[in-house]
Image: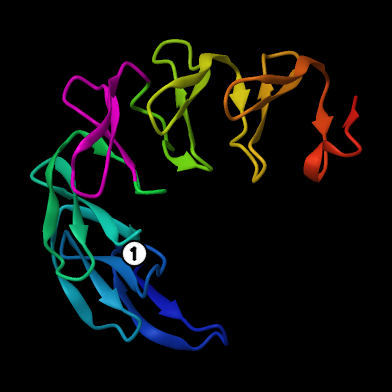
Amino acid sequence: GLWGFLDTNGHIRIPAKYKDCSSFCSGMAAISMNGKWGFIDKYGNEVIACKYDWGWYFSEGLAKVKKNGKWGFIDMNSGNIVIPASYEKVWDFNEGLAAVADAEQKVGFIDKTGELQIPMMDVDYRSGYYSFDNGIAILEAPETGLKGAINKEGTWVLPMEFFNIFYPDDEGYMKVYDGKHWGLYDSVGNEVFPIIYDDIYYDKGLNGVFTQ
């Protein structure tokens, strides 16, 4: 089957003629035709030619693309590669940084100029989602899959010894799970509630904390 786009009323706005596509973001969508990827606007105009091996939607003005077996980023204004396609894997930009994996399968974070801001680390490059949210990125150990958390300086605020970590809320609190119980930490790594509870629920400011 082929893909197209409907408007919110269910009317066909862009005919189904694409082998694959992304959703629209920043006014453009990635589309696949004849084995190559490019980008269209909301009127179906091809604004970036189908010349990449793979592509996806724009995030913070940059989109990840694959060319000659490697990954890099293009700029939404020019459509040109602005961060060379030299990585084994890349993730989307968020909060000004994007995770990248090198040939040794180590993962670090670059800024929008392509400069490495957080050095390459021995973490699981197969993870589906490495990104900063409220100043924290959650990473996984390559063999155990246990999770830890770093800040934007690349400092570990939580070691890779948790089964699950929730990204911090707007107040900087993170729920953590050790495989049996839940606890609560702040985004600096300080324990707020010990890991002894079946679950933790709280509202803004930790008022009315309820644990089971």
Residue at image coords 61%, 24%: 164
Q: Residue at x 36, y 75 (%)?
A: 27
- Quick one: 121 or 105, which is closer to the camera? 121
Q: Looking at numbered disc 1 in the image, what kind of residue is underneath it?
A: Cys
Using residue 143 as the reference point, say whether residue 167 is left or right of it.
Answer: right
Residue of label 1: 21
Task: Give the farthest residue toward the left.
Answer: 68
- SS for callout 1: strand
Quick one: label 1, few (<14), some, or many (20+) residues within 10 Å? many
Q: The N terminus lies in which quarter of the figure?
A: bottom left
Left or right placement of residue 125 versus residue 189 in this view? left
**Colour mapping:** rainbow
Against 176, residue 33 (above or below) is below
Which quarter of the figure is the C terminus placed in?
top right
Asked if the magenta segment contains residue 100, the reply would be: yes
The number of numbered discs placed on residues in the rendered structure image is 1
Between 190 and 180, which is closer to the camera in this rendering? Answer: 190
Which residues, given as a range, are shown in magenta? 97-123
Using the rendered view, name the quadrant where residue 152 is placed: top left
Q: Residue at x 39, y 15 (%)?
A: 142
The image shows residue 208 at horizontal and vertical percentages of 91, 38
Nearest the eye: 139 or 68:
139
Q: Position of residue 103 (x, y in %)?
A: 16, 25
Residue 182 placement (x, y as % from top left): 75, 21
